Amino acid sequence: ESILNRTVFQNDSYSRLLSQRISNYMLGLPEDAYEQFIEEVRHITPDDIHRVANKYLHPNALQVVVVGNRALVEDQLDEIGSFKELDIRIPRPGESVERPQVIGDEAGGRTWLNKMSSAIISEDIQVNAFITEGSQTVETMQGPMEMGVTRIIVSSDDIRLDIRTAMGAIQMVIEGDSGKMVAGGQEQPLPSDNVESMKLETLRDPIMIAQGKEVLPVTLVEQDKEQAVLYIGGETDAYVVIDKETALPVQINYTQFDEASGSDLDLEVHLSDWTEHEGITYPYSVNVSSDGETISSITYTRHYSK
């Protein structure tokens, strides 16, 4: 009966009827194919359903499919018995292709990285933990979403985000290679992809680049009278555009894999409104865009270190 009842709504306009007729024509079906289908459904009996179910459904041969992070569900798989593991992760395009080496002036790159670091962190300042407070606007399919954000960075393996939204507070914590999210009194693990994304985003933060001046591989790719472009290698894997007058970065470019689309996104992070407080200078306006479209924007109101 549910199938027959749905037909009322599937044929409630001229456009739907026309679409159905066109579909029948393209598939080589008679014009009244749908009417024939409805008539056949009317004549189906419970015995017909049992006969077909017994023919095609075999409970003893059913297989259980579990999708998730093995490390998080492995203790529950004992109930299933033996199983076969399949890797269904979307591969990053070109990840198996060796990337060409960035050519440039390594000594010049080290010089400008040191200048940038000194412009961000005063020589007498020791940063054990860096804290920022502000608000972030993220573009979503439903429109812009605003939230308050407090971030604490100890290292790329020790991060905490306290997010305040209209629907409540969310806390995200990264410890090593794992993470968790706490919301509404409930705690759940963060997917590994989210953990990796947060760690990489932290590595590309100006404060982290400045702190890594002694160990980060760096190359001066190009420069003119106003700007110097550095490539920061390793996990950071980003291009940093430095304003020569202030020695502060005005833009950071990098590529990030987007699993939703299965493709790489070229991101531009624009940094401005640099503000000094207690020996540390930090951008209070951060705008992230891709292909000219803004993805998110952050306005900071306070920063300090411990």
Image (tube, rainbow, N blue to C red):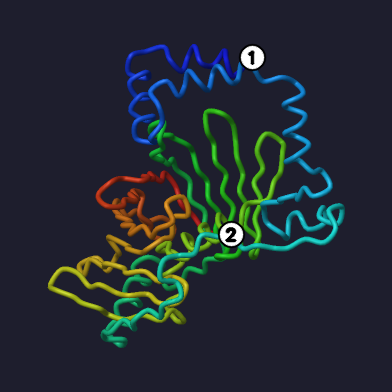
Q: Quadrant of the C terminus?
A: bottom right
Please name the residue that numbered disc 1 is placed on.
1
First in sequence: mark 2 or mark 1? 1
Please name the residue that numbered disc 2 is placed on.
88
Neighbours of disc 1 within 10 Å: few (<14), some (14-19), many (20+): few
Q: Quadrant of the N terminus?
A: top right
> What's the distance in space between the residues labelled 2 and 1, CA to CA?
38 Å
Residue 88 position within the rendered picture, expressed as x and y whole percent measured from the top left: 58, 59
Determine the residue positioned at 33% across, 68% down: 119
Confirm whether residue 210 shows in the render. Answer: no
Determine the residue positioned at 47% across, 22% down: 34
Task: Judge whether 75 appears above or below 47 on screen.
Answer: below
Task: Judge whether 164 appears above or below 263 on screen.
Answer: above
Give the mark toward the camera: 2 or 1.
1
Going by the numbered disc 1, the residue's amino acid type is: Glu
Determine the residue positioned at 55% across, 54% down: 194
- Write down the quadrant of residue 154 in the picture: bottom right
Residue furthest front as drawn: 30
Describe the element under mark 1 as helix, strand or loop: loop
Going by the numbered disc 2, the residue's amino acid type is: Ile
Viewer-closest of 77 and 123? 77
| Left or right relative to 41: residue 216 | left
